[in-house]
Image (tube, rainbow, N blue to C red):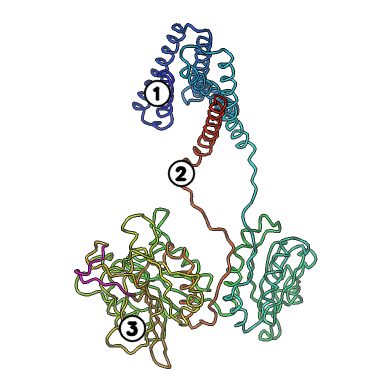
Amino acid sequence: MSLSALLYLVGMASLFVGQRLLAGYDAMQWTASLAGLGLVAVAAGMRLRGLRAAQDEGLRFGHRVAMACLVAALASLVMYAATTETVVRGLTLSRETEDRWLGVWRSLWPIVWLLGTVPLLVVDYAIQSSPVMMPVRRIRDMVGHGLVAALGIALVFPLNYIASKKNERWDLAYFKTPQPGTATQAVVASLEQPVHVRIFMPPSSDVAQELRAYFGALAGPNVTVEVIDQAAEPRLAKALSVRDNGVVAITQGEVDLEATDTEEGEDAKAEPADAASKTPKPVTRTIKVATELEKAKRTLKKLDGEVQAILRELGHGERVAYFTTGHGELGWDGGVNAPVDREMTALKGRLKQLGFKVKQLGITEGLADKVPDDADLVLVMGPAKQFQQAEVDALRAHVDAGGSLLVAIDPVAIREPIVGGPDPLYGLLESLGVVVGDGMLASEQGIVPISHNKLDRLNLVTDGFTQHASSTTLSERSDKNVLFTRMAAYLDEADEHASKVTFTVRSLAVVWADLDRDLEFSADAGESKSARNLVAAIEGGTDAAPWRAMVIASGSVMSDLGVGFLGNQRLIDDGINWLIGAEALSGTTENEEDVKIEHTKEGQTTWFYLTVLGVPLIVLALGGLRMRMRRRGGGR
């Protein structure tokens, strides 16, 4: 490559940096842009000097072609200038005209630039390879090859413009309506009163077939299923408040059509002769499903979870779960910038699917006095600050009265310093039967790489599960499930207690408790490698007021980061069902929803340049390599 071509490329690169990467930094932008134009001008001067100095006709023809290509590239810069904000604003165009103006010039200037640059580089290579004499025919051949390559690359730009104006989408994603999970089947088997599922859809539609296949697997003594066209059964649809097709109505109790007609009639306001003889109005819950399969896919993929939540509510009523607040616990309203290991949106959503109404409980809600009587479960999720003694006394009273408690406690090292004596929460845990060990668990094996440095030694996984009612699915599927925990403490059994403690999850044996916080194993510092207890299921109380509690040695287990692992999801389902005495309902919930892939702006930019520039350049390089090999073969 000649010095002229090299200066040309450097100048163009400087222009690109100034216009695209330094936008908003006026001084730097102008400096880079003017420097680029200066280098291009120098390159043009050197090319002109080469043309005057050339003696061979072929070389002179080559330099003239190179000059023409360079002028074409400079013309593309003028076209680019027509798309800048300064020029467009000065033209005072209408909105529609401005869109057309920008669309035309933004598509043309890259094409003209390529038609000038690629042949210029090809001809420059030919001239440099034979600086004394050059056949005119070879220059023409090289120009032809360069134009073909440039047009091939340039095809990307009009295609992108057309695609942006004619935007079409094809759904090539995997789709499957899930079958009922074992947890849903267990809920159906536990129903005390049968439910009736009415699918308001045109019977011949594809969506109706998908729904019929799912609910057909649940049909039996406790569930009856039928597909109904809303227009064919207007009275029944009105009784269930269904106005059109596209609804699945799940009803517990019989629908009295005659009573519905009476309520709509003239005597609807009259009091019945015997109010006690009125049949209780059935309870109906609905799921909206689009009548077109393409639009219904998203709902169908997660159908099992929604159906399970409705059946739990109809069969067992709504329960109430209280999350303690005011101590730096995990939350669900931290905003888009909240760390994923301090958010528990997924846990909140799963509790709702399990039939819970979720509430918060802090000092302002009365935690220092007592836990509300309607609490079926109280959750303390990774508090960073210490509790007051009055709050802990209220939690203890809740447990002694036969309540359920779930505590996820983080290591002391990542909690705020305790002042005024030990944290009363640790005293509560000890009275329940467990104590929190010193240090933070770390390992060099069995870890999840997230930050790709030594901090990853805190990201532990384990498949050490014990057979227990609070970990039924985990232990049965330990070959497929692992539990993830980040920055975990560990648990030991307290010396004196009256409860029954079962450690249901243990770490791998390669883990050590990092006491000096250097994330390095050191036997001299008193550190040792062994399996540590991560989760404890505790039972106690009297026959009149039995209680259950679960203690987890890290809040991250229940965070959105942890719930991304299937084992953590199983622990939530099994553990909460066990805490409320519904372990018979434990099992799997099927979900065919696609895993969401997050793309950052930087990642999108990288992929754009790789596909638009990288792939064509690779093809061009392979073509050039092939031509070179053919020349060598011909020479031999």
Q: Is residue 565 above or below residue 316?
A: above
Q: Residues within 10 Å of mark 1 (few under 14, many from 20)?
A: many
- Compared to residue 559, the image places residue 379 above or below, namely below
Locate residue 489, reporting x and y percent: 31, 71
Judge whether 46 appears above or below 532 on screen: above
- The residue carrying mark 2 is 601
The residue that mark 3 highlights is 432
Judge left or right: residue 440 versus residue 606. Answer: left
Q: Which residue is mark 1?
A: 33
Q: Amino acid at mark 1?
A: Ser
Residue 169 percent location from the top left of the image: 64, 46
Dot placed on the residue nearer the N-terminal end, 2 or 3: 3
Region of the chain picked out in magenta, as a range: 520-530
Residue 557, by quadrant, is: bottom left
Residue 119 drawn at (x, y percent) = 53, 21
Relative to residue 285, is residue 92 depicted above or below? above
Q: Nearer the viewer, residue 280 or 271?
A: 280
Q: Residues within 10 Å of mark 2 (few under 14, many from 20)?
A: few
Label 3 SS: helix
Residue type at tag 3: Leu
- Residue at disc 2, secondary structure: helix
Q: In the rendered structure, are the residues bearing label 2 and label 3 in contact, judged by CB atoms less than 8 Å apart?
A: no
As drawn, the label of residue 402 is none
